[in-house]
Image (cartoon, grey):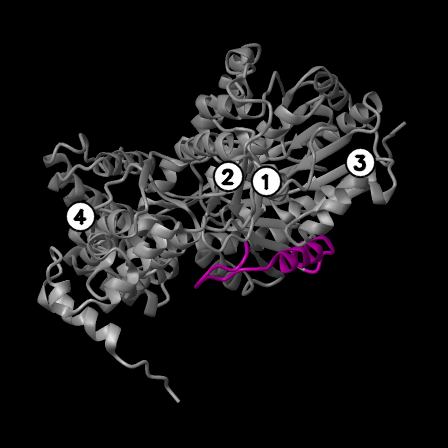
Amino acid sequence: MVSIKNFTPRLYQETIMASCAKGNCLIILPTGLGKTKTAILAAAQRLNSIPNSKILFLTVTKPLAEQIYNEVRDCIDLNGDNIALFTGSVTPKKREELWENAVVVVSTPQCIENDIINNRINLENVSLMIADEAHNAVKDYSYTWVAKQYHKKSRFPRIIGLTASPGSDLEKIQEVCKNLYIEEIEIRTDKDPDVKPYVHEIEINWVKVELPKVFLETRKYLRDFLNDRLEKLKKWGILRRTNLKYVNKTELLALQAQLRGRASIGGKDFVVWTAISVLAEIMKVSHGLELLETQGIIPLFTYMQKMQHDALNTKVKAVKNVVKDLNFRSAFVKVSKLYEEKVEHPKLIELQKIVKNEIGEKADNKMIVFNQYRDSAVDVVEKLNSVDGVNAKLFVGQLKKGETGLSQKEQKAVLDDFRAGKFNVLVATSIGEQGLDIPQVNVVIFYEPIPSAIRQIQRRGRTGRHEKGKVIVLMTKDTMDEGFRWSAHHKEKRMYRNLDNLKGKLTLFLNTKEEKITNYVKDDKIKIFADYREKGSGTIKELIELEVELKLDALPNADYILSSRVGVEVKTVDDFVQSIIDGRLLQQIKNLRNNFERPLLVIEGIEDIYSVRNVHSNAIRGMLAAISVSYGVPILYTKNFRDTAMLLNIIAKREQEETGKDFSLHPQKKALSIKEQQEYIVSSLPGVGSALAKPLLKYFKSVKNVMTAEQKELEKVEKIGKKKAEKIRDIADREYQTLD
């Protein structure tokens, strides 16, 4: 029997666990109320009801995986060797070994995805899959594909999703439920009677500041820039309303995607292409405006300075158009002056006061300050450390190009020091919002409101765990801050409303009757070799969905080998054109042709091949002609990775029915016939090629006769002519010279 240790289950945890015992369940609990321990209860129950089975506990990052691994070891009564941790730092071979003996495996989904693709693990005996931070189970995130494989391959599948907030959008919640095969939702808030005894009151204060006059002058220039571009879009019939209050980033991104879709199907409309560029300008300046209103001069100056630099080193029109605009230039002059004068955003001044007061009231107070942007967070740390009694540290994600960052090891060290009381203020970006076991804090400060219900709930949940907590939100009047505040407020209300409506209706959104490819093909699997560099592609995952026997290896001359004679190179439209530019393509085609009897090139995507790069269309046409005519490699077109996978599967099926499934990883090109060898030898003569080799052999009857024929005799063959005859005779008669 597997038992629980070191914690006593709460009533609501036992109630939720009972639902998990019946079917796939999405557990929604506020941060700090024991989602992980509830899942551990369910894991123990599952191991006891299905002996000799495994538990797969997935979470989104390596630090979270390490945290959950330690919690599982602490709370579930198993031998330490039976609990394994899978992350990118554990080698694939080691993971394969650990899987054999493990009862509970804690992993990132990417590791499991890779191990499934490479046939290192078998999901057959996994009796429970737990998806932590389950709101990530959307679109192409690894959770989605792993869950599908698990649901298909496990003998007794059961899935539990854990989240503090699945989001406000009904379609997204439905997508999460569908992707994780959820049958029941268990939701608790701090207002539920069985939860109330375990939560503490959280006091929420909104602190408003005024934007200084010098900021307003700069803002006017940026707003004038935006109004000018929005009016253009309205004039072209692209946008209906131009009031900045009602034109948000989400709307602009959706519009941009729509226009790109129109352009990708071959549209040459000047207005569409120009509108795409104008939208890019709007997005860039809108971000600058947000930095000014909500963050301050330092991050804005850094951003504008980078744009100036980028404009000198890029061909992107949008960037160049922005920096040469009079309004932008005027704004940059103002910002540069304010930067030199070290003018601070009023939020920063107010934040220093708030932190000083909180430390004054209680010297051992611990605080987290959440900030949206790294540059701003760095400035916040510096300013807070100038306050008496304050010791602040930065907590951000891993290093990015040109940015401040912390390695995962450094992140752990910062949290350990915070837990030990070595400093009292943690200044964190979004990395501090999701899942990490950040020690109990008395005060949480939002440097800015955020428009996301998920992130708002996660930020707020960092306090009030063991005693009364306080949340302080800084907000600049008459700016984007106000819009973000109300956006998050309404989204959170909508989230709970949607969840209530969704409960009991989940069967409407479940795809329980999945069609399998085995309904249409023979029981014996199709075999395909794939280059290991393709493992991250959607095509690989789709081939596994089609139940192909996939073998990954280093393939020097193709992306896929489908039979003893068929090798395939797959390129997206973008990569095809890029490989023309960087000179890779012809060599790849030569390798393909020289190593496979039946080489194929697949070009994937619906984009207009003549518009994805700044390459003359005739150059692309010339390359297509060379591949198909000069090199004799057929070109096939597919819409997307799913279409590509289906095509590869069909070709492989046809080929293997004809030639057999037992073929080599490195197939040799079929030996040429005597006739083909003769043609090959003659075609290598100058100016001859494959087209003229046949008439020459037909006229002279043998390779020897071609090589010994007089010039006048050669000229009698159609299309040879005097010049080609001279070259043939010269190459045949010329003495071979070695280089000593």
Q: CA distance from mark 3 to mark 2?
A: 28 Å
Q: Quadrant of residue 103 in the image?
A: top right
Question: Looking at this view, is 314 or 568 the one in front?
Answer: 568
Q: Disc 3 designates what residue? A: 103
Magenta range: 396-422
The quadrant holding residue 70 is top right
- In the displayed structure, would residue 341 be above or below residue 10? below
Please tell me which residue is depicted at 29% across the width and 36% down the height of the picture: 606
Q: Nearer the viewer, mark 3 or mark 2?
A: 2
Tell me if 414 is positioned left or right of 338 in this view.
right
Q: Earlier in the sequence, mark 4 or mark 2?
A: 4
Q: Position of residue 509 (x, y in %)?
A: 50, 15
| Magenta span includes 414 | yes
Helix, strand or loop for disc 2: helix
Of the residues under marks 1 and 3, which one precedes in the sequence?
3
29 is within the stretch colored magenta: no
On residue 117, the disc is 1
Q: Say which amino acid is labelled 3.
A: Val
695 is higher (above) or lower (below) than 607: below
Asked whether the residues under the numbered discs 3 and 2 touch, taking CB atoms below 8 Å apart as contact, a structural biologist would say no
The residue indicated by pointer 4 is: 224
Which disc number belongs to residue 540? 2
Could you give the CA–CA distance between mark 2 and mark 1, rounded to whole angstroms?
Answer: 8 Å
Neighbourhood count class around disc 1 (C-alpha, 10 Å): few under 14, some 14–19, many 20 upward: many
Amino acid type shown at disc 1:
Ile
> Which residue is rendered at x = 34% and y = 34% of the image?
639
